Image (tube, rainbow, N blue to C red):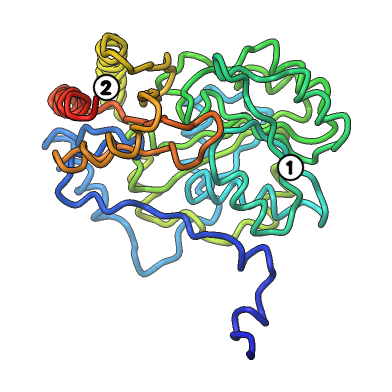
């Protein structure tokens, strides 16, 4: 039987991949994607729309996004001596980092962690390796990590801080030991920094191999798709060579500058999410059969009774609540579900639905 055109043309690694799937959330209370649930006040929205009137859509955007770049450095307290590269979300920055590596390079990350580290590595034909986290608390297994670093000599190590999907912060001493041991780059992915009160941005001057990556998606600008990475100018300059020109469109640049210039816009939202996170965590851990893990992000990972994750997930969907079912990933995530912290009424609807579903399943 003759092979299909795609089978003859594309690399085996690509043919073996599955596309990243996003669930249809139409009609659901959407608590599956770690988004900020709060929209802007009408007055702020009106000011933003007025700003967009000045955008020249017939012209290409500033290729360096100079105004936005400078504002990001100031808002995120990035020292002047370090450079920043912007991307179409963190995903593009991860892709740029991995595209820059020589063939046969090794990439290392804990497991479980952000799925795009593996997805993009495999799609580029790189050697991706993962080291399981400790089963009791999702901490780094340092003997195993250091052994992997010694044997593999990875070109890049990704550490999500807090980690996704477990929501915990790895020990600072462990990360510093990895930075000291790594022969290549160590990328600290701080996507959830607004909720964590912890960062390695201040360590940039202490480690030549450290890069710190962030996104505006979790803060409340997911629709703009803006991520950035900070590090030594020499490293950022090499990545900039393979960045596609005009990768940050004019509307994203203008909207991000406007939003980041509103000092009182995001802080109350972030505080509300953190407060709701604490309350929801307590309530979940009061339920028989549920183990909810502490979180430094805007979501909570919780373990269900053995074998019930799929049916609980489906039961919540039937009640109009969409969360994330991680149990099919197996391993440490068997029987685990993940819920984004939403507005109070959304969290209550989720909790009520969970209680009702548990009652029918147990």
Pointers 2 and 1 in contact (C-beta within 8 Å):
no
Characterize the local packing of mark 1: few (<14), some (14-19) or many (20 or more) Cα atoms within 10 angstroms. many
Could you say which quadrant of the image residue 257 lies in?
Answer: top left
Could you say which quadrant of the image residue 30 lies in?
Answer: top left
Can residue 258 be seen here? no
Say which quadrant the N terminus sits in. bottom right
Q: On screen, 53 above or below 229?
A: below
Q: Kindly give the residue lying farthest to the bottom in the view shown.
A: 2
At 52% from the left edge and 37% from the top edge, which residue is drawn? Answer: 330
Q: Kindly give the residue lying farthest to the right in the view shown.
A: 151
Q: Secondary structure at mark 1?
A: strand
Q: On screen, 352 above or below 221?
A: above
Left or right: residue 206 compared with residue 21: right
Q: On screen, 70 above or below 207?
A: below
* Residue at numbered disc 1: 107
Q: Position of residue 24 (x, y in %)?
A: 27, 54
Q: Which mark is residue 143?
A: none
At 62% from the left edge and 65% from the top edge, which residue is drawn? Answer: 14
Q: Position of residue 158 (x, y in %)?
A: 65, 34
Can residue 43 be seen here? yes
Left or right: residue 271 compared with residue 27: right
Measured in 3D between alpha carbons, the distance from the residue under mark 2 to the one under mark 1, in whole angstroms, is 40 Å
Front-most of residues 311 and 176: 311
At 81% from the left edge and 35% from the top edge, which residue is drawn? Answer: 184
Q: Nearer the viewer, mark 2 or mark 1?
A: 1
Could you say which quadrant of the image residue 131 lies in?
Answer: top right
Say which quadrant the C terminus sits in. top left
Q: Which mark is residue 264?
A: 2
Front-most of residues 158 and 13: 13
Q: Position of residue 63 (x, y in %)?
A: 54, 56
């Amino acid at each position: 039987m003759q092979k299909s055109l795609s089978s003859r043309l594309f690399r085996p690694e690509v043919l073996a991949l599955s596309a990243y799937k996003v669930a249809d959330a139409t009609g659901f209370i959407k608590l599956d994607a770690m988004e900020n649930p709060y929209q802007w006040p009408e007055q702020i929205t009106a000011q933003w729309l007025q700003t967009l009137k000045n955008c020249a859509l017939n012209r290409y955007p500033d290729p360096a996004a100079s105004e936005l770049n400078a504002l990001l450095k100031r808002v995120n307290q990035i020292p002047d001596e370090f450079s920043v590269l912007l991307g179409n979300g963190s995903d593009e920055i991860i892709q740029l980092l991995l595209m820059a590596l020589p063939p046969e390079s090794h990439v290392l990350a804990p497991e479980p962690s952000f799925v795009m580290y593996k997805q993009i590595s495999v799609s580029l034909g790189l050697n991706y390796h993962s080291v399981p986290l400790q089963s009791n608390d999702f901490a780094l297994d340092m003997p195993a990590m250091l052994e992997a670093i010694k044997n593999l000599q990875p070109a890049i190590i990704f550490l999500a801080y807090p980690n996704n999907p477990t929501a915990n912060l790895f020990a600072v001493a462990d990360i510093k030991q990895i930075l000291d041991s790594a022969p290549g780059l160590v990328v600290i992915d701080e996507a959830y920094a607004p909720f964590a009160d912890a960062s390695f941005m201040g360590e940039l001057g202490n480690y030549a191999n450290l890069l710190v990556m962030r996104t505006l998606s979790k803060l409340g600008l997911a629709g703009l798709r803006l991520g950035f990475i900070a590090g030594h100018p020499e490293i950022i300059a090499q990545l900039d060579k393979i960045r596609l020109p005009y990768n940050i469109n004019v509307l994203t640049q203008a909207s991000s500058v406007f939003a980041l210039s509103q000092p009182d816009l995001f802080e109350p939202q972030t505080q509300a999410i953190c407060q709701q996170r604490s309350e929801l965590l307590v309530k979940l851990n009061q339920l028989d059969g549920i183990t909810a893990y502490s979180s430094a992000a805007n979501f909570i990972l919780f373990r269900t009774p053995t074998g019930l994750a799929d049916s609980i997930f489906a039961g919540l969907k039937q009640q109009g609540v969409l969360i994330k079912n991680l149990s099919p990933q197996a391993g440490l995530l068997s029987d685990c579900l993940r819920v984004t912290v939403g507005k109070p009424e959304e969290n209550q609807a989720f909790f009520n639905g969970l209680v009702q579903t548990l009652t029918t399943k147990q």
